[in-house]
Image (cartoon, rainbow, N blue to C red):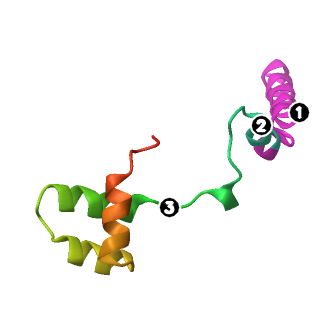
């Protein structure tokens, strides 16, 4: 019975050692990782492009949803994807 408690205590100590400071340090050391403040959400833009290409909504409606002009939308849709 005491062996089980010793193992649990040892396991908890090891867990604390390995997880101490791991959250931020691992993310910052990942190659190619972006700072979260630099990321721009693009989901709505992708959804509008997809619906416009599929003729489900008009270009003017997509531009209105995104809050840009139709000319800007056309320019964005004509440029190649960087993904």
Between marks 3 and 2, how big is the CA–CA gap? 23 Å
Give SS at disc 2: helix
- Viewer-side residue, 66 vs 36: 66
Nearer mark to the viewer, of 3 and 2: 3
Query: Where does label 3 land, which residue?
Result: 41
Between marks 2 and 1, how big is the CA–CA gap? 14 Å
> Where's residue 58, x and y in %?
16, 71
Residue 52 lies in magenta, yes or no?
A: no
- Quarter location, residue 37: bottom right
**Taking 68 as reference, is 55 left or right?**
left
Q: Residue at horizontal 83%, vertical 18%? A: 3
Q: Quadrant of the C terminus?
A: top left
Mark 1 near mark 3, Cβ–Cβ under 8 Å? no
Mark 3 near mark 2, Cβ–Cβ under 8 Å? no
- Quarter location, residue 53: bottom left
Query: Where does label 2 land, which residue?
Result: 26
Query: Where does label 1 land, which residue?
Result: 17
Nearer mark to the viewer, of 1 and 3: 3
Q: Quadrant of the N terminus?
A: top right
**Taking 51 as reference, is 68 left or right?**
right
- Viewer-side residue, 4 vs 28: 28
Marked residue nearer the N-terminal end (3 or 2): 2
Crowd band around label 1 with a 10 angstrom C-alpha radius: few (<14), some (14–19), many (20+): few
- Quarter location, residue 19: top right
Magenta stretch: dominant SS? helix
- Viewer-side residue, 15 vs 21: 21
Please state the extent of the stretch shown in magenta in the rendering.
Answer: 1-24
**Taking 65 as reference, is 14 left or right?**
right
Give SS at disc 1: helix
């Amino acid at each position: 019975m005491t062996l089980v408690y010793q193992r649990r205590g040892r396991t908890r100590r090891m867990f604390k050692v390995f997880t101490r400071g791991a959250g931020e340090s691992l993310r910052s050391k990942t190659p190619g990782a972006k700072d979260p403040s630099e990321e721009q959400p693009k989901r709505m833009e992708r959804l509008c492009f997809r619906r416009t290409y599929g003729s489900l909504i008009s270009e003017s409606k997509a531009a209105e949803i995104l809050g840009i002009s139709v000319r800007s939308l056309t320019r964005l849709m004509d440029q190649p994807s960087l993904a």
